[in-house]
Image (tube, helix red, strand yellow):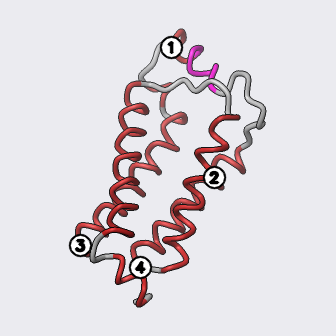
């Protein structure tokens, strides 16, 4: 069970990194019209976007993933808190325009995160966090 949990954490971290980097590679395979539509991302946002916030968010997810990988109790609680915060703040990010690849990766990340949360709290893995091994 531990190996499955760790595998999920690594997969979610890799997919998150790919998802965050996708906008920097979209120009390689999309037309100018498609890129124009993708530039509408964040339209109407009440929270202004910035590179620091964008990459800082990924950094936090990756740090939490490392903590989950090593069964750190603080990382488990922080993962839930940061996930909830991200859900609430998502309401203020404006219109999100995703490519089919980004949409698929986003869905896979959501599924992996759900499995991670479930395993971290509702399976025998939860005992690993109690011991903080």
Circles 3 and 4, Cβ within 8 Å, touching? The answer is no
- Residue 110 in the image: state x and y as whole percent: 41, 46
* Labels 1 and 2: the sequence-earlier one: 1
Q: Which residue is mark 4?
A: 71
Q: Position of residue 28 (x, y in %)?
A: 45, 26
Residue contact at pointers 1 and 2, CB within 8 angstroms:
no
Q: Are marks 4 and 2 in contact (CB under 8 Å)?
A: no
Would you identify the image quadrant in which residue 37 lies?
Answer: top right
- Compare marks 3 and 1 and give the one earlier in the sequence: 3
The CA distance from mark 1 to mark 2 is: 31 Å
Residue 50 or 127: which is nearer the viewer?
Answer: 127
- Marks 3 and 1: CB-CB under 8 Å? no
Q: Which mark is residue 1?
A: none
Q: Are marks 2 and 3 in contact (CB under 8 Å)?
A: no
Task: Tell me the quarter of the image containing the N terminus.
Answer: bottom left
Magenta highlight range: 36-41
Characterize the local packing of mark 4: few (<14), some (14-19) or many (20 or more) Cα atoms within 10 angstroms.
many
Taking the spot 58% from the left edge, 27% from the top edge, the residue there is 96
Q: Residue furthest top?
A: 33
Badge number at residue 34: 1
Residue under pointer 2: 85
Of tags 1 and 2, the one toward the viewer is 2
10 Å crowding of disc 3: few (<14), some (14-19), many (20+) = few
| Residue 125 % position (x, y) | 31, 76
Q: Residue at x 53, y 9 (%)?
A: 33
Residue 66 location, x and y as percent? 46, 71
Label 1 vs label 4, nearer the camera? 4
Left or right, 75 with respect to 46, comes to left
Label whose residue precedes the other's in the sequence (1 or 4) = 1
């Amino acid at each position: 069970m531990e190996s499955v949990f760790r595998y999920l954490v690594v997969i979610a971290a890799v997919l998150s990194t790919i998802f965050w980097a996708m906008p920097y590679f979209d120009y390689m395979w999309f037309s100018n019209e498609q890129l124009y539509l993708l530039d509408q991302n964040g339209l109407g946002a009440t929270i202004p976007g910035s590179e620091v916030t964008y990459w800082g968010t990924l950094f936090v997810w990756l740090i939490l993933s490392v903590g989950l990988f090593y069964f750190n109790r603080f990382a488990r609680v922080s993962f839930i808190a940061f996930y909830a915060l991200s859900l609430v703040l998502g309401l203020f990010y404006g219109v999100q325009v995703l490519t089919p690849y980004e949409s698929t990766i986003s869905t896979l990340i959501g599924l992996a995160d759900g499995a991670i949360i479930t395993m971290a709290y509702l399976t025998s893995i939860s005992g690993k966090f109690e011991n903080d091994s």
